[in-house]
């Protein structure tokens, strides 16, 4: 668990909800849904022991789903001593089956009939999780092949489906609950209510995880860490570095100096907006380095996207080093590390798809202590903090943007002319999204410039120019 000084007092007193990850695609989503109920959550590996859990003093434990069968060789399990801690437990999907398999009297069978997608659930006994006026029949999201065939001793079956006799079960006395469906996804309309019954009624958690108290706790932590020392922050123009800078500035004021390296590879007008927001409106000391010419020179003849990422990252390091060297007595460096970064940094088994522009970026010989004021937060929480701190919507609701900027949205060589074309095209895409009122519904929408030309017609005349690829993505 993170140092308690980083958490509001009420959160420390009640303890976190631990989400045990069994390899689920939804583990982070479960943790986010818990936080949306204003309860603090952390994700832990399934290899954690009962003794380690006890030291964290959790208010409750949620077992996530997972891709394996509980019968598969090497399938992940939890230390069985967890059930003897007296801490409330909620098993979801694979986690529910694990409860049935590990506790006496329960069994999980491969029935040959799985359930995938929207499924009608029949509540046979409201119990704790289905109270509060929830309908007896409701739609839930299923994703399983094995099924719980027998509830463990002492459990009451509270819901079933047409093909699964045990779709939910509970042992009220031991405070152990399990659901075969996924309450965390939007396809389960009453899923959040199920989670909140577990959090409030079973675990007794207060709704103490609110951004105002999080800001107060972080400001106190930053002051304690930094003291009277100088702090520097590399602004990228993105949400994370912007909110991190604003939060640190609230804590230490003029001790903070921000360095903004304008690469010339940002979205249209973005560089000027960053300077306007932080220097003029936030009153933050800002070093603005105009480096577009150096970047275009560095990228001359570079075609491979991974080579472009490395070239852009290496040049940023050199420029940042030069700028930081002029700030006397700087001891601390602000980084916009988020909670998903902290979780993913512990994953060693994933294949390398692309180098991440926020990881390992600064050289080891830069002698700074890190200040990471956002390392407990998910992206949606970062936006809420930014709004509380008074940052404009144009910054707070800025869509995700790669660190190398438009350099990796241009296929082939990067030139000033290509960047100008893509900036204008991207601005049109974003303006259309805004005009349609979809800016906060579409997670990411952007334009890509391919390395080909095509014939077109403009003003009854033949043209030969670059096509534009447009992509829009939604995400939970």
Image (cartoon, grey):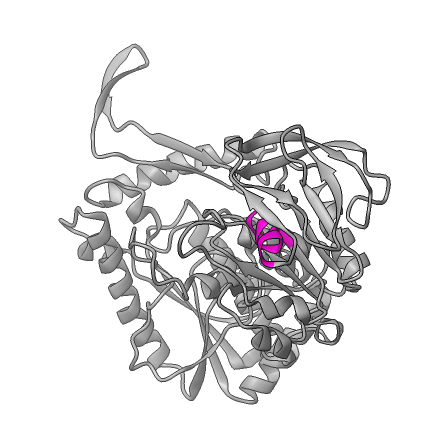
The boundaries of the magenta stretch are 91-102
Tell me, yes or no, if residue 1 can be seen here: no
Locate residue 145 relative to residue 291 in the image: left or right: right
- If the image is split into quadrants, where does the N terminus sit? bottom right
Report which quarter residue 423 is drawn in. Answer: top left
The spot of residue 41 in percent (x, y) is: 63, 63
Q: Nearer the viewer, residue 250 or 359?
A: 359
Secondary structure character of the magenta stretch overall: helix
Residue 96 falls inside the magenta stretch: yes
Q: Nearer the viewer, residue 155 or 22?
A: 155
Q: Height in image: 201 above or below 247?
A: above
Locate residue 265 relative to residue 411 in the image: left or right: right
- If the image is split into quadrants, where does the C terminus sit? top right
The spot of residue 231 in percent (x, y) is: 48, 80
Q: Residue at x 63, y 46 (%)?
A: 184
Tell me, yes or no, if residue 17 can be seen here: yes
Residue 174 falls inside the magenta stretch: no
Q: Residue at x 26, y 39 (%)?
A: 418
Q: Height in image: 111 above or below 281?
A: above
Q: Residue furthest top?
A: 460
Q: Residue furthest left?
A: 301
Report which quarter residue 174 is drawn in. Answer: bottom right
Q: Height in image: 441 above or below 343?
A: above
The spot of residue 288 in percent (x, y) is: 40, 66
The spot of residue 342 in percent (x, y) is: 47, 66
Q: Number of labelled discs?
A: 0
């Amino acid at each position: 668990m993170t140092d308690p000084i980083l958490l509001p007092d009420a959160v420390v007193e009640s303890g976190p909800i631990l989400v045990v990850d069994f390899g689920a695609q939804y583990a982070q989503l479960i943790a986010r849904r818990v936080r949306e109920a204003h309860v603090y959550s952390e994700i832990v590996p399934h290899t954690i022991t009962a003794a380690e859990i006890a030291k964290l003093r959790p208010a409750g434990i949620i077992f996530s789903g997972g891709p394996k069968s509980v019968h598969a060789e090497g399938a992940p399990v939890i230390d069985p001593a967890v059930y003897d801690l007296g801490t409330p437990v909620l098993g979801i999907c694979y986690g529910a089956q694990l409860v049935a398999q590990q506790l006496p009297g329960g069994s999980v069978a491969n029935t040959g009939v799985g359930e995938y997608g929207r499924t009608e659930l029949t509540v046979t006994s409201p119990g704790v999780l289905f109270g509060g006026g929830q309908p007896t029949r409701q739609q839930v999201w299923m994703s399983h092949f094995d099924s719980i065939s027998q509830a463990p001793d002492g459990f009451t079956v509270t819901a079933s489906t047409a093909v699964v006799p045990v779709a939910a079960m509970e042992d009220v006395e031991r405070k152990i609950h399990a659901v075969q469906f996924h309450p965390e996804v939007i396809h389960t309309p009453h899923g959040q209510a199920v989670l909140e019954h577990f959090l409030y009624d079973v675990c007794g958690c207060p709704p103490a995880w609110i951004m105002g108290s999080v800001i107060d706790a972080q400001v106190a932590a930053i002051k304690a860490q930094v003291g009277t020392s100088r702090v520097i922050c590399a602004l990228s123009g993105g949400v994370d570095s912007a909110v991190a800078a604003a939060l640190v500035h609230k804590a230490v004021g003029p001790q903070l100096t921000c360095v903004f390296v304008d690469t010339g590879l940002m979205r249209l007008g973005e560089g000027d907006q960053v300077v306007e927001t932080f220097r003029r409106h936030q009153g933050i000391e800002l070093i603005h380095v105009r480096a577009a010419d150096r970047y275009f020179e560095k990228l001359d003849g570079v075609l491979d996207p991974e080579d472009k990422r490395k070239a852009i990252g290496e040049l940023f390091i050199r420029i940042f080093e030069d700028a930081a060297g002029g700030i006397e007595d700087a001891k601390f460096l602000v980084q916009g590390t988020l909670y998903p970064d902290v979780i993913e940094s512990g994953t060693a088994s994933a294949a390398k798809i692309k180098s991440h522009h926020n990881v390992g970026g600064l050289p080891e010989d830069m002698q700074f202590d890190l200040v990471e004021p956002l390392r407990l937060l998910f992206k949606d929480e970062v936006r809420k903090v930014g709004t509380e701190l008074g940052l404009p919507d144009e910054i707070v609701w800025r869509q995700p943007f790669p660190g190398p900027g438009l350099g990796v949205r241009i296929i082939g060589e990067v030139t000033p002319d290509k960047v100008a074309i893509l900036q204008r095209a991207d601005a049109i895409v974003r303006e259309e999204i805004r005009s349609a009122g979809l800016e906060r519904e579409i997670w990411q929408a952007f334009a890509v410039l391919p390395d080909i030309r095509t014939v077109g017609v403009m003003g009854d005349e033949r043209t030969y120019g670059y096509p534009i690829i447009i992509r829009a993505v939604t995400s939970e």
